[in-house]
Image: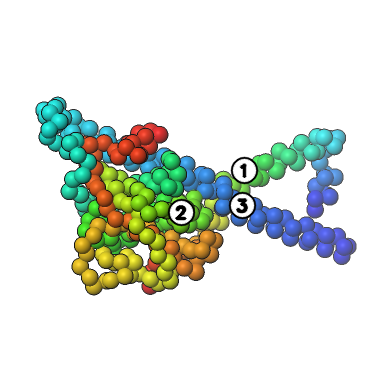
Amino acid sequence: MYGALWRVLPGPVWARILILLVALALLLFVLSTWIFPLVDGMLTPSQPVTVDQ
Amino acid sequence: MARTVIGIAGEVLITAGVLVFLFLGWQLWIQGIALNNAQTSEASGLSQSWSASTTGPTAPDQASTPSPTSGPAAGTVSAPVVMAAPAETDQFAVLYVPRFGADYKRTITQGVDAKTVLNAGGAGHYEQSQMPGDMGNFAIAAHRDGWGSPFIKINELQVGDPIYVETQDGWYTYRFRDLEYVAPDGVDVLSAVPQAPDAAPTDRLITLTSCNPLYIASERIIAYGVLESFTPRSAGAPAAIAGISGTGA
């Protein structure tokens, strides 16, 4: 998977690394801004803090 | 062929594992930073809106009675004003605990539902308990770890530490009294007289509840405070929090 990704990327090694770094940064941004809050909202709180019956 | 398939499957699994760790790291740190920033600005907004809305009525009052011998400015201790219970999910108060941080402030919302109230990173008010300043028990809950970790330092409270609650009417100064550890179903800590549900209240208490131990929720940690004084809004914020209450700070 990652080997194929590396072969598909164009340009010299430094350009491929640059592309991957930008893609990684973009991925982290998308995850922390939209995906993780969504997942957090779907999970029931694993740590209830209230006292109740 | 089989090697390729297994290789791809392995990479997918490793990626999934990394994503789970990323989520946990995000939940513990990044989300907390975002929620705390949001809490600070929401709390500041509430405080400012209350100050702004009372500037009108108090300004002519001060102008007509400039003498310091009259009015609430003479002393900060006066009979506590008790507001009516707000609608569920209404933000009606701001909590200040200097022991939790010099600029610590969190909103207090009516209700203790996790998804609609507590996961926003502030505190929630048990609706069956009394309002701030009232005879009895003002009981609130907040997360110990995760979702901003608003009560992560609850076990570090020292006897006599101030706990301030600001509402539209002014500031309630409570003093921390003691900690108690109870089972998750120990609802009697919310009684007007904690652990004595049938007794008639004689004290004005605040009760903070959270989970214990850290990162585990097998018990509840309870912190009690006793009302020391009420400071009406016209007298200004108590000195210890004057820099962070009612201002944009």
Pick the front one: A10 or A46 = A46
Say whether marks 1 and 3 touch (CB < 8 Å).
no
> Could you tell me which secondary element the residue under label 2 belongs to?
helix
The chain letter for the residue carrying disc 2 is B
Q: Residues within 10 Å of mark 2 (few under 14, many from 20)?
A: few
Q: Measuring 38% from the left and 37% from the top, which residue is drawn there?
A: B244
Q: CA distance from mark 1 to mark 2?
A: 35 Å
> Could you tell me which secondary element the residue under label 3 belongs to?
helix
For the question of whether residue B167 can be seen, the reply is no
User: Label 1 is placed on what type of residue?
Assistant: Phe
Quadrant housing residue B198: bottom left
Quadrant (top left, top right, bottom left, bottom right) of the N terminus of chain B: bottom right
User: Label 2 is placed on what type of residue?
Assistant: Glu
Reply above or below: A10 against B173. Answer: above
Check if mark 1 and mark 3 are on a common chain: no
How far across and how far down the image is residue B29, in percent? 57, 49
Q: Measuring 76% from the left and 36% from the top, which residue is drawn there?
A: A18
Residue that numbered label 2 is attached to: B156
How far across and how far down the image is residue B7, in percent? 83, 60
Tell me: B31 left or right of B56: right
Say whether marks 3 and 2 touch (CB < 8 Å).
no
How far across and how far down the image is residue A6, in percent? 82, 45
Q: CA distance from mark 3 to mark 2?
A: 24 Å
Say whether marks 1 and 2 touch (CB < 8 Å).
no
Label total for image: 3
Residue that numbered label 3 is attached to: B25
The chain letter for the residue carrying disc 1 is A
User: Label 3 is placed on what type of residue?
Assistant: Gly
